[in-house]
Each structure stands twice: as structure tokens, then as C-alpha cells.
Image (cartoon, rainbow, N blue to C red):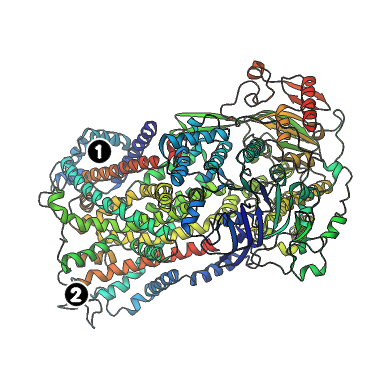
Amino acid sequence: MTVLDIRHLNVSYVSSRGIAQAVRDLSLTIQPSETYGLVGESGCGKSTVALAIMRYLPRRTRLDGQILFQDADIATAPPAVLGQLRGNRIAMVYQDPQSSLNPVLTIEKQLVEVITAHEGATGEDARRRVIEMLEQVRMPDPAYVLQRYPHQLSGGMQQRVVIAMALLLRPDLVVMDEPTTGLDVTIEAGVLDLLNDLRREFKMAILFISHNLGVIARICDRVGVMYAGELIEEAPVRQLFDRPHHPYTTGLLRCVPQAVSRHTSGALYSIPGRVPPLTALPRGCTFAARCAFAEPGCTQGAPQLESVAAGHAARCFRWRTVIEQPAAAPVPQPPSTPAKSGTSNRQALLTVSNLKVYFTQLMGLLGLARSRRIRVIDDVSFSLEPQRTLGIVGESGCGKSTIAGAVAGLKPVTSGRIDFGDSDFTRPIARRSRAALRQMQMVFQNSDSSLNPRHTVEKTLRRPLRCFNIVPRGHERAHIIGLLKAVNLDETYLDRRPRQLSGGEKQRVAIARAFAGEPQLILCDEPISSLDVSVQAAVLNLLQQLQRERRVALMFIAHDLNVVRYLSDEVAVIYLGKICEIGPAEAIFQPPYHPYTEALVSAIPAIHAGAQPHAIRLEGSVPSPANPPSGCRFHTRCPRKIGSVCEQQEPLGQDVGDDHIIYCHIPLSELRALQTQTEAQHTQ
Amino acid sequence: METPLDQPRLAVSSPSPAARFLRILRLLTKNPIALVGALILAMWIVLAILGPAIAPYGINEITAGAVWKPPSAEHLMGTDQLGRDIFSRLLVGTRQMVILPTLSVALAILLGTTIGLLSGYRGGWVDEIVMRVMDVMMAFPVLMLYLMIIVAIGASAMNVVLALGIGATPAVSRLVRGLVLDLRNREFVAAARMRGESTAYILFQEILPNALGPILVDGLVRIGYACFSMGALGFLGLGVPPPNPDWGQMVSQARNALIITPSAPLFPALAIASLVVSFNLLADGLSEAVKAD
Amino acid sequence: MLRFILRRLGTLLITMLVLSILIFILSDVMPIEPALMILGRESTPEARAALTEQLGLNKPLPERYVAWISRFIQGDWGESYRMGVEVLPLVQRRFTNSLTLAMMAAAIIVPVSLLLGIIAGLNESRWPDRVISIGSLISISIPDFVVGLVLIVLFSWGLRILPGDSSLRGDTVNLMEHWQKLVLPAITASVVLIGYIARVTRVSMIEVMDSPYIRTAILKGLPQRTVILRHALRNALIAPVAVVTTQLAWLVGGLIVIERLFNYPGIGSLFADAALRNDLPMIQASAMIAITLVVLSQGLADVIYALLNPRIRFG
């Protein structure tokens, strides 16, 4: 018996700006104990589907079609029926657990009330069931957690609470809307493992929504791909990833770097253009304008979802051509950066030695009472040669952005040295010369706040030219147009303001601004993490192309291991303010690893079958940098901890060769043996 | 939740601030509440300009034997305790009631924005101390502060502006500081710093333009409150001293005649109320329009 | 929680201290010559100089401040220049009267404004919201003396059901005996703040109802009543309580006008009279008491704020 049967669902949002057709003619079914993945970029309508199933939509929304669940049609059900279904037969898990939990109620109250509302049970009985459920979601110390308020729990624990809340009454269907998106990769891996176990234990049906193909691949049985409000392809998970039939699916799968380096794979595949606005959709196929296979006929009639194989459907006129000739592979580029020098015959461009950045947090009145020191960066050293790329990777809060801030002079250095060429860059911005400032520019994380909303693109790009005297005043405009062309924009953008640009366009302008002063080093602080997958590839391509043409070095900071691996020549892995492993990119991603790197690599959800690395999972959450663990900072979570030496002594670097250094107490040979062994076990 | 409506709107492409102003003005006219406010305010501004010219009587012109007369064809709003025409005094008093509160808020914005910008951008202990002082000032009942300042420096048009301006400064600087604290951590400010821009450029070109909208909307509300307070000062007998007619003072004097002619205090009272209402309606509509923009 | 209260108390003390300095400086620049006020116009310049010397008024400002504040703390508040009475007992009496009036106003403001704000917030853009929004906008725009006058004309002169003059013969208020005299002033003091707090509550309620945790509560299948009473209300009250803190000074300032309008013998009218008649000790004492009232109620609001918001209690 089908659990959920959606037939011809249409949802549109009505506003003064027009009617946005968020979901169009969507039909799908979910069987008992099946996990159905819905994947797509932001604005494709996948969350609207989730909210329509819960019948939780803004007041001015048009909804038609049928959402059949058990005996009811949710699309037309009266409030009383909805009240009985929600939280009881259908439950939901949300993207941001922190804001999904009521900040002023204890966890106990928020969990118990679900049982009370639907079954009338209260008191000890309900409390016992809640504790049991928390144990089932592997929550450490449930009795303690019950007395806490949401803000007192870590992100991973909050999400476990939300999952427990959804599963309390053993619903038939759980809708999960990006349940791991805000979490760090090692935490995400743990939650995904948990979900995989729970879906077997509870035999429930799951609608799993995500933009992350790797996550979908890890957890789903069947997958639907959405684009601009339509389901454009649907297939069993392996089938979809191995033999995609829709050009958009093909593009999505190809534009994410997968455990490769640019030196071997060349530029990334990218999908040109962007998602059409839902208020003004084009005629015919909505993807035609971005499609390499499009013919004039594609824009005439709208394609229907047609069956292309058993259980596999695609909404494309030309799917036969698509599977015959997967778009010509992009031409691999020659290695874009000079090989690393041997000994010291090349001078490093940037040398950071023993960098420490401590923040002082004032507490109490005027900070008189007491203050505490937060060791954000604690003794970090590395160097970067001209025109090469250093990747810095780590989870949120590890201090990687602070390193960039300190190098840029935006954050004061507590101790240590930063040398750039021959000049001392330890000092803050105010005490660096114009000439020194010009050498180093930055591309920021948040495309929304990296450009001044009140400045036009022209003004944004003119300032660096003025400040660094790049061209005479009369030539500024021509030069700016040249810069825009270099980032694949044109002069029609000159008068636009940031709110008239898409995320990708904003980031292009920000990149143009960084290159405008003709620097030697560009610091990139998570430059693509706020962008959609299909746009990320284009921005990464642009960055490496400009790097090659303009001969700059990049310091590339990211949490995404695959992106760092793709772009970097050298990589430093940071944990809690310290480097745990540093070396050539390819060496970092092969055993022997630092146990933390090993866990990170193992946590990445991979798209391709068989590419899933062996499972190493970390316990607990990252300790506070205000009170870091003694000895090796990673010992509290390390799965390979060898004993008290880890707690007492800070590990020294072990040289693997080729400037690859691992800071760990475990001897290299042992580490290598352990890690190749586990890897072998898991590939069998 | 996804916001499918947040697609960049390429259709609306009006880059210059003047065009933005016009667009907001257009949005305003679509908002009936704001429109009413704008019309009332426009009326008072016109009367502030023309008042003395169209007043039927001089402000100190005494009609013999006409003390506390109710409204009549001769005296539209009746007469006061000396037999002066209330309508004429109201008209002539408009100018100071419109100009002085506006000036005082201009002063408060000038002082408050300077303090808020510097304190918020510098941060650290300077900010801590400045903001503590502002907090403390805000715990001082405003009217009490005005009265003490005016007793200390004497009542005159300029001193009323000074007192109202100083009294409103802490709130403005708190607002500006809050905006600056948010804006100074934006990445475009970091980019400006990395270009070596001067603090003045960062404050006035990067930060202030983004804070201006909320400051001006708040300013409108504040002009309303300044009218409110100026009325109260006049009512307490510490407003702008004679011979200029002060609405608050007119209310206060006429209140003794409530039994004889209840309408006498109501005219100036309603005049103050309608002026304040117009500022509040306008500010309300403007903040909606800026939000929608 | 105890630590929180103690910390707040420390802040309050500092606030009081700084305010007392401000009051002292302001009253010091007032063109009032104490010796002249005490001895009268007929006194000789020599006698005045001697008294000035005796009162220590030639000493530098910080020294005079310390002397003044320490006398003040010990309860020696001096004698009125104009009324020839001890300041302390008079101010105490008037303070009780004002406190009674303020409490009565608060008893009206808090339930009415929160209720209106919540109703408007729950009905965003529908007619109850439109009526309340426009009504509150108008109510915050009408000066309190105008409201008071209209009320007097209506209820005292028109309907003749409530007194328009609230003067008290014994200068001491008795709630049972005088409640009728308190009604109109209390309503007058409430109007502006009801509008203001209702507006803040409305916005806060709308934001809360739109928040992910309310979505969670609804999608748990909880009944509407539980969603609003248990999940929304407490969160929606956090913002108005924070705002009330900043408006208490406004309320106390408003008392000056209202007490004068109704001839009510409170601290506000005492202050206004003193200010108009250059009665320096009375100005200082009544200002100090008024700010004490503000600061203490701010402290109270802070504690309520922390009780509502566990993020403050358990940082």
C-alpha cells in the first residue's frame, strides 16, 4: 500500500510582485519503508513540496491537486484531520534545529507535549517514552538533556532532539527538509548514519529533501530531481547517479568536484545561465535556455515526464541523445601552477610563523570582573609560494577564517610573525603601506554582504583602481569594463546595484574587485559556500582561470574537502586552532592520514557507488577554544587515541616526506598500516 | 524555507538615489495612511509659511470686552483671557511649532549620528563608556531633563531647540550605534579596509548610506515627539516666551476657562495632536515603503 | 539567577550615581543663588557671602558634590526655599502619591496593551489588526495634556461622573477613598504607552508566529490554543518587556504634565513647581526620587525579562 500519493500538485505564491509558480504538476508516490529523495537547487520548489504535504503554506497560496495520505486528501482536509495527522502519522524534521526548537521551553516539555496532544499520556509514562526515544537516537545522557533549553545543546544534539520529536509516535511518513545542511561534515556523517539505522528499525517512509547529491546518494532508495518547480527526472538512486537521462541531472552530477585535483581533471563542468524566475517562466522546457542539447523545438511545447526505463522517468524531449553522447568531456588543462621548488631556491611569498590569535572576551561590568582568553589560533605556521594555492580546511569554529583575517590584517595578531615577500605583515592594516596593501586582496564568503548595497558595480570596481593608482582617471571606465569582461560580465552591469545581481554575479564582481588592484595573493574565505551547486563550478573555474592568467597565489579557505582537494597544491587541516596535518594536496588525501583528516575524508558523502570511504565517525562535539583540551587537542574525539600520552603531550610533527607533516603521537608506520587495513576492509 | 520571490528583480532598475527617492514616494502615495499624514503635514507647512499673512487679527490685538468668547463668525475659534483672537494666534504659532522641533531633531541626528558612528565603529572601551552614559541619560525622564536644562539656561526658542535636541541625542546615538555594529562587520567594510580607505571614507561612504533610511524614518517619529514635548514645555510655562504665541501655553491658559468655553483649549490641543499624528503616519508609511523597496 | 540579580543591582547603583552627578551639575549651572533664596532680597551682600561660605558653596564642584550626595544618602535633604518645610517628608508623601498613580496606570497599561497587541498580531492585515494599528498610531500621537483635557471635558464637564480636579486635601492619597480622583489621570497616563506597547507587541507577535519553532509546534499537531498560549505568548512578550524598560522614563516624565493638569499632588507636580520657582533643594530631591523610581522599575523589568528568556538566565 502506498503511503503517500501526490497527484498533479500545483502550488503558487501570490504577492504584489506577481504569481510565483513554485510547484507545477508534480506527481510522486512513496511506498512503505521507502526513502524518497527530492533534490534540487534553492528555489526549485522542493521545500514547498514538503510544506504542502504538511499543509503549512502562507495564507495567500494557491494549492491544487491531490495529496493522498492513508484515507485523507491532505490538500483539502479540514483542520481537525490535519491536527490528527501532523506530529502523529506524518512528522517533519527541519533544516535548522536551533530555530526549530522553542527557545523558552525545556526539551522535556517540547517532547512530552507531542505524546500528550495525540495520546493524552502525561507524567512519568510520557517521560519514560521520551527517554527511550532519546536513547534510540543515540542521545548521550537523555535525563540530563531533558532539563536543558535548546541553546544549551550543540547543533548535532539539537538535531537528534528534533528527530526524536518526529519519531516519538512512530509516524508512517517523515518529511525531512535538509536535515543535515547546517551541520559540520563530521556531525552530518553521524546524523546520516543514525537516520540510515532508524529507517531500517522503524520501517517508516521518508521524504528526504536535500541540495546535496552526496547526502541523497547515501540515504535514499529512489530520487526525484526538481528544476524550476517541476520534477524533471525520477529513478532508483543508483540508476539516477549512474545513468542520468536529463541534461540538468547530468550537469549537476558533473559540476561537483569528486575527490580529484584540477591537475588531473581540468576545469569543472558548469551549467551556464541560471534558474529562471518562477514569476516569469519561459515557454516550453524550462531548462532549454541552459541546455547543451536544446533544439528550437524544446521551447515550443512543454515536455512531459516520460518513462525511459523501468521505474525511471525523465522530462526531456531529447533524452535519447543525452544518454548516447554524454556532453563532450572538458579539455583537461595543463598544470596551471609552477611545480613546487626543491629546497629553498624559490622564495616563499607568504610565510606565517608561530601565529597566535587570542581573543579576549570581556565578562561582567565593563570587563572589570574578569575576562577569558579564547585561543582561536594557537601556534600555526605555514608558507605559500608565488602563484600556488594553499587550501585551509577545517570545521566551523576551527579558526580557519581567523587565519585569513590575521594575514589580511583585519584581526590583531597576538604573537608570531607574518612575512609577505620581504615585508613584515604582522602589523594590522592601519600600519601597512598602500603598496603593501595592494599586494593582498580578499574574496569573502557571503555574497550578500561582500558588496555595498548602495554602491553600483562601477563604483565598487573604481575604488581599488583609485586607491592603488592602477590607471589614470580617464581610463578608469574602460579598465573597469575590462575587469567585468574578465569575470564574464559586461558593461551593462556597470550601473547595477547588488540587489539587481544574482549570488553568482555578486561573487564575480567581488572577484573582479579583488583582482582590480593586481595583487600577488588573494585570500578566498569560503568564496563559494553561499552559492548554488551549479554556480559554484563556474566561480571555481573563473578563480583558477584568473589565477593562471594573472599569476597570483591563492589562499583558499573552505570546509568542503573535495573543493579544497580540487583547487589546492598544498593543504593544511586545522582543528581547534592548530594544524594537525599539512602537505601536498594529493598526499593529504592518501594514508597515512592524521586521524582527524581520516575522519573528515570518511565523512564526505560521495556520489559514486564504491567511492564511499571507510566509515570513521567522531564522537561528541568540538570543545570550546576558551578551554581547549590538554595535550593533543583532538584526543577527546580521536577514534585512534593510544593512551595518556595523547592527553598530556602536544604531538610533534612527523615528516612523511615531501614536506608532508602529521602532528600525531602514533608512529607513521603504524598509522599507515592501520589506515590501509580499515580501507581494505571496507572496500571488500 | 525557500523564498521563491526573492529572485533579483531585474525589471526594477533605477540606480540613482534620486530615482530611489521617487520610487519610495510612489510607494508612499499608494499607502492611504501615509497619504493622510502627508496631507495634514503639508497643510501645516503651508500655514507655517503663510500663517502671519492670512491671520485675521494681530497676535496681540485685543478685542475689547471679548474675553473667553466662544467661536463665532468674527472669531473663528473664540478669544482668550485678554480678548485676543485664538485663530490668529494659532496660525502665527504654527511656524515655531513646525520649525523648532525639526531643528531640534536635526541637532539630535547630527550629535547622535556622530556619537553612534564613532562609538560603534571604534568599539572597545570607548564604546562601552559612551553607551553606558547614553543608557544612563535615557533613564532620565526626558521632560524632567528638558525642564532642568531650560531652568539652567533659560527659556528661549534656541534653548528649547537645544534642550529637545540634547534630550533626544542618546536615543539617536543608540540607534545609529546598533546599525553601525551590524554594518561594520559586513564584508564590504573589510574590503574597504583592505584597500586602505580612510576611516572617514568608511564611515561616510560605506556605512552611513546604509544606515540613512532607518535614521530618517526614526527622525520623523522624533520630530513628532519633539512637537509633543514642546507642547508639554509650553503647557508647563517653560516654552518659548511671549510675545510669540506658544500652542502649549495657549492650552494651559485656556484650561482655566474650561467652564466658560470648553472649546478654547481644545483648538490648540488638537492642533498639536494633528501635527504629531501627521509625522507618525508619515513615518509609519515611509518605513513600510522602505521595507518594500 | 541570583548572580544575575546582583549584577543588575550593581549596574543600577552605578546608573544612579551617574544620574546624581548629572542632576547635581545641571542644578549647579542653574542661575540660582542659594544665599539669596534663603535670606531674601533684603539681606546684605555681606550676610549672603557669609552664608555662602558657611554652606561650603565656594568649594570646587567635586567637593560640593561629595558633600551633597553624602548628606543626601544620610537623609538630610535640606529645607525648601519656598515652602519653608523639610524636603524629605514632603517628597516621601508625594512619592507615595505618584507611585500609587503610576501603579494604577500600569494596571491599565499592561493588560490592555498586551491584549490589543496580541489580537492585532494574530490577525495580521485583517480588520482587527487594521483597527488596532491605526488606533494605536493615533493614540501615540496625542500629547497627554490633550488627552487629559478631552477626558475632563467629557467625563467631568459633560457626563459629570468623574472629578476633573484631583487635588487632595491631606496631600496623602488613600486608594479606597480617592480612587475616583485617580481614574482620569491614570487613563491619561496610559493612552500613549498603551499605543506604544501594543505596537511593539503586535510586531513581536507577528515575528514569533512566523518563526520556525511555531511551525514546529503547529506541525506537531498541537491545538491552536496550545500553540499560542504555550509556544507563542512567552516569546512574544520578550520584546515588549525590553521596550517597556526604555519607556519607563517616559511614563515618569509624563507624570509631570498629568499631575499639573489634574492638580494631583505627586512628585511630578512637585518637581515642576520647584523648577518654576527655583526651589533648588526641592528640584534636586524630587529629580533624585523620580530617577530612583525609573531605575528601580527598570531593574524589575530586567528581572522579568530574564525570567521570560532562558538564554539570559543560562548564558
Q: Position of residue A566 (x, y in %)?
A: 79, 41
Using the numbered discs, state the Cα–Cα distance from disc 2 to disc 1 in whole angstroms: 47 Å
Asked which quadrant contains residue A643, the reply is: top right
The chain under label 1 reads C
Please tell me the numbered disc located at residue C32.
none
- Residue C177 visible from this viewpoint: yes
How dense is the environment of label 1, judged by Cα within 10 Å: few (below 14), some, or many (20 and up)? some
Farthest-out residue, left: C169
Residue that carries the numbered disc 2 in the rendered image: B83
Asked which secondary structure carries label 1, the reply is: loop
How dense is the environment of label 2, judged by Cα within 10 Å: few (below 14), some, or many (20 and up)? some
Q: Position of residue C299 (x, y in %)?
A: 34, 40
Q: Position of residue B10 (x, y in %)?
A: 66, 65
Residue that carries the numbered disc 1 in the rendered image: C57
- Residue A353 visible from this viewpoint: no
Q: Nearer the viewer, residue A449 or A408?
A: A449
**Are marks 2 and 1 in one subunit?**
no
Which residue occupies 24% across, 59% down? Answer: B237
Asked which secondary structure carries label 2, the reply is: loop
Compared with A550, B78 (above or below) is: below
Compared with A194, C201 (above or below) is: below
Between label 2 and label 1, give the one nearer the viewer.
2
The chain under label 2 reads B
Q: Nearer the viewer, residue C3 or B165?
A: C3
Which residue occupies 16% across, 67% down? Answer: C157
Which residue occupies 49% across, 69% down? Answer: B28
What amino acid is at disc 2? Gly
For the N terminus of chain C, the quadrant is top left
Q: Is residue A264 left or right of residue C246?
A: right
Q: Nearer the viewer, residue A555 or A320?
A: A320
